[in-house]
Image (tube, rainbow, N blue to C red):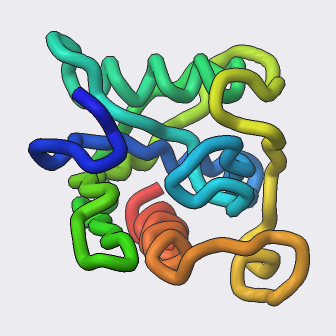
Amino acid sequence: MRREYPEAPIIGVGAVILHQGKVLLIQRGKEPLKGEWSIPGGALELGETLQEGIQREVLEETGLEVKPLRIIEVLDRIAHDENGAVRFHYVLVDFLCRLTGGELRCSSDAISAEWASREQLNSHGKYRIPSFTVAVLEKAFRSTEEHP
């Protein structure tokens, strides 16, 4: 299935990995959101579960191994072109994940990966993070405060 101008929505998975009070961010190397900072993730492949998909995507993009703990958010991301046609349509399932192993290194679709503090998410500094992603990250931080 093609990602740009798809015939149907694509299921995407995202990993909110919190570790030592910080969250892992990656800088995207491809559209959509090329050059922007986000959480690791990507499209689910045929035959894999949501959990398998998130583990594969995190390993491919960052070299890290994770265990998905719970769903943080499910949301739609639909982008139209200048003529109004649907250029991208994703249904995203974001998971809170626990780091279980590996070594941080960029590969696949990520051109950079860094651990960011909660305070850095809301500043207008280095990380250009879409507001919908910041909302998911804040929800994850609150979730771990309420249910560690």
x and y percent of residue 36 in the render?
69, 62
x and y percentages locating residue 12 in the rendered image: 31, 42
What's the residue at 51%, 54% (across, down)?
Answer: 32
Q: In which quarter of the image is residue 120?
A: bottom right
Observer-nearest residue: 62 or 30? 30
* Residue depicted at 70% across the width and 18% down the height: 63
Which residue sits at x=78%, y=80%?
Answer: 119
Q: In which quadrant will I find the N terminus?
A: top left
Q: Where is residue 98 in the image (x, y as percent from the top left)?
A: 53, 36
Reply above or below: 132 against 25: below
As drawn, which residue projects farthest toward the top?
47
Residue 8 visible in the current orientation? yes
Q: Is residue 69 left or right of residue 100?
A: left
Placement of 134 over or under 28, stated as above or below: below
Please identify the residue farthest to the left as the structure is shown.
Answer: 8
* Residue sitting nearer the eye, 85 or 77: 85
Q: Quadrant of residue 6?
A: top left
Image: 110 above or below 103? below
Q: How many marks?
A: 0
Residue at 48% x, 39% y is 41
* 19 lies left or right of 15: right
Q: Is residue 54 left or right of residue 101?
A: left
Q: Is residue 145 visible?
A: no
Q: Where is residue 124 in the image (x, y as percent from the top left)?
A: 82, 88
Q: Which residue lies furthest to the right in this view?
A: 126
The answer to whether 56 appears left or right of 117 in the picture is: left
Q: In which quarter of the image is residue 34?
A: bottom right
